[in-house]
Amino acid sequence: MVQPVFINRISACLPFDAVDNEHMEQRLGQVGGRPSRARKLVLRRNGIRQRHYVIDPATGEPAMNNAQLSAQAVRGLAGPGFELDSLDCLVAGTSSPDQLMPGHAVMVHGELGNPSCEVVTTAGICLCGVTAMKYAWLSVASGESRNAVACGSEVASGMMHARNFDGEYESRVDELEQHPEIAFEKDFLRWMLSDGAGAVWLQDRPNARGLSLRVDWIDILSFADRLPACMYAGAEKVDGQLRGWALFDSEQRSRLSLMAVKQDVRLLNENIVRYTVEETLARILQRRELRAEAIDHFLPHYSSEYFRDLLAEGLQRVGLAIPQERWFTNLTRKGNVGSASIYLILEELFNSGRLRSGETLLCYIPESGRFSSAFMHLTVVGDEA
């Protein structure tokens, strides 16, 4: 029997002070010792003005790893009623784990040091944060757990640092002399992604005082049957197919910057709205009653302000034209933090004092890895006081 589940607390962890556009390259380093030609163009299009990195500005070294950052977000849930020692289920998702093995979530559990509980890792890119949330929600809804914590986190700066690309630059110095930046499909992501973590605490009852968010449904769809991989790391595209890192020797991995995150920008622009908005909502609307006028807050996670109007057009084409004055996003102020972004958006709105009992939230989380999408519907319950 499925029982109602409530998000009762949301936490965010953003390391150090925000880094503005002019100081990004100081923190991430210059590839080949030269400024990126792509940086200003990318930043002008994505609209991001500041973001956070775990890189200590004083030392230039990371001050914490991903597991530690996630654990900080979970500890941020502390307060009346939340006891880490009584946690039944911990689910953690990231696209930038500290290691290939073991799984990210058990490393987070080790950092937290709470007693044994069910621990699950979800993998992917932006969607692994919401798949973590769905697992936690279903665990409580089914009665398997009394409570659960889900978190999404990213330490993109480790993959975006210049040291990861110097090997490729040095091996192709003649070819790149006229274009000192690395291939655009790699370089542009250095100015798109950033670090942070968020966590939610779910229970089978709402808060005794204050507001909670009832999880009504979470729908997730993949279109991997329709489209090739668009965003990837640890692989190279060979004849349109991904060839994994284990099939390359160490010299090739360095020369090709194989562990760098890459994205096919043309494939992204041509398909992201069609599949993650229109095709996804066409299927959801067949099974869910969803009307634009009934949605009080629309929380979209998109990677760039460039996509904002395209997203609005896609919503209009499927008959769900939510006015942009009802949209809430913090991309320009907190950056694109991948799987953590929807947590950071929810945390800011939930703790803003703007929500009222009975209001509805619709969250949109796309992923261009191989084109997948999620929509999540929440209802505000409780006492504003």
Image (spheres, grey):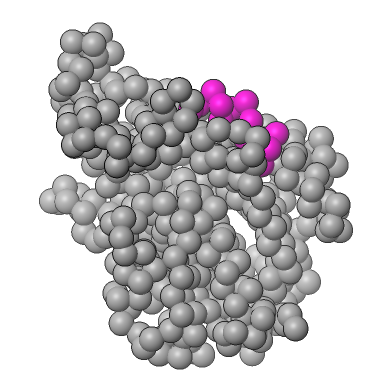
The front one of 119 and 349 is: 119
Please state if 108 lies on the left or on the right of 315 as rendered: left
Report which quarter residue 297 is drawn in. Answer: bottom right
Looking at the image, is 349 positioned above or below residue 53? below
Question: Residue reaching furthest left?
Answer: 59
Question: Which quadrant, please, contains the N terminus?
Answer: bottom right
Give the residue displayed 70% in from the left and 41% down from the top. Answer: 277
Give the residue displayed 75% in from the left and 64% down from the top. Answer: 360
Please state if 275 lies on the left or on the right of 11 as rendered: right
| Residue 269 counted in the magenta span | yes
Question: Which quadrant, please, contains the C terminus?
Answer: bottom right
Looking at the image, is 354 positioned above or below residue 52? below
Report which quarter residue 174 is drawn in. Answer: top left
Give the residue displayed 46% in from the left and 80% down from the top. Answer: 118
Please state if 287 lies on the left or on the right of 354 as rendered: right
Give the residue displayed 62% in from the left and 73% down from the top. Answer: 137
Residue 335 visible, this angle: yes
Please state if 148 lies on the left or on the right of 297 as rendered: left
Highlighted magenta segment, given as a residue range:
263-276
Q: How many marks?
A: 0
| Residue 274 counted in the magenta span | yes
Residue 333 visible, this angle: no
* Magenta-drawn stretch, dominant element (helix, strand or loop): helix
Residue 309 x %, y %: 67, 33
Residue 178 x %, y %: 25, 8
Report which quarter residue 319 is drawn in. Answer: top right
Residue 288 x %, y %: 83, 58
Looking at the image, is 303 positioned above or below residue 217? above
Residue 2 x %, y %: 73, 80
